[in-house]
Image (cartoon, grey):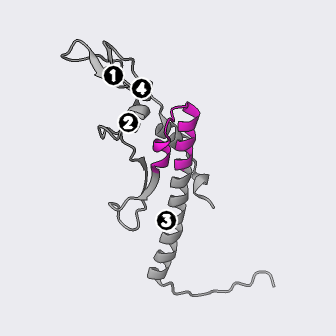
Amino acid sequence: MPGRVSYVKMNLDEGAAVKIIANMGNQAAYRMAQKLRSRVIGNMRAAGRIDSGKMIQQTQVRRDETTPKLVLGYTVSTDATDPRTGFPYPIVQERGSRGHGPRSAPFMVFTPKGGSHPIRVKYVRGVTAGNFFKDALAATRASDALP
């Protein structure tokens, strides 16, 4: 019967709808964050800057608790630090550093990784920026959130 129209009246429970939609959004945001994490780790491996694997092991996805419940937030970060100094070296690997020398002494004295005795140098070259997170974020697509 073409041309026949039926009218349907529905009552929606807004609380239930918000619960379902919020859960779907949460899952999509988490999938996207996990995909971003895997891209960051891939970038780290591709750059060849992995020695002990601590940067990769400590790259994690965490729920950002500072955001309201309906504003979904996940953080992809790494907590790796130098065990001797506590310095967060992934920051230097991500952003890079310039070459530098001692500020007040005639030489810098340190024991290099894998070394058995300290060395004295007047200058060390900088580290080029790895841009692991920046490049991974640039490669993110909306389809990363889909199952």
> Who comes first in sequence, dot 4 or dot 2?
2
**C-alpha distance separating marks 4 and 1:** 8 Å
- Against 37, residue 90 (above or below) is above
Q: Are marks 4 and 3 in contact (CB under 8 Å)?
A: no
Q: Which residues are magenta?
A: 36-59
Let me know if residue 56 is in the magenta part: yes
Mark 3 or 1: the one toward you: 1
- For badge 1, the amino acid type reads Pro
- Residue 115 disc label: 4
Q: Are marks 4 and 1 in contact (CB under 8 Å)?
A: yes
| Quadrant location, the C terminus | bottom right
Q: Which residue is mark 1?
A: 118
Q: Which residue is mark 3?
A: 26
Residue lying at 56% horizontally and 44% vertically, measured from the top left = 39
Q: Secondary structure at mark 1?
A: loop
Q: Are marks 1 and 2 in contact (CB under 8 Å)?
A: no
**C-alpha distance separating marks 3 and 1:** 51 Å
Mark 4 or 2: the one toward you: 4
| Quadrant location, the N terminus | bottom right
Q: Secondary structure at mark 4?
A: loop
Magenta span: chief secondary structure: helix
> Who comes first in sequence, dot 1 or dot 2?
2
Q: Are marks 2 and 3 in contact (CB under 8 Å)?
A: no
- Residue furthest to the right: 1
Residue 44 spot, x, y in % from top left: 53, 37
Residue 146 spot, x, y in % from top left: 61, 59
Residue 105 spot, x, y in % from top left: 20, 15
Residue lying at 39% horizontally and 21% vertically, measured from the top left = 126
- Residue 89 disc label: 2
Q: Secondary structure at mark 2?
A: helix
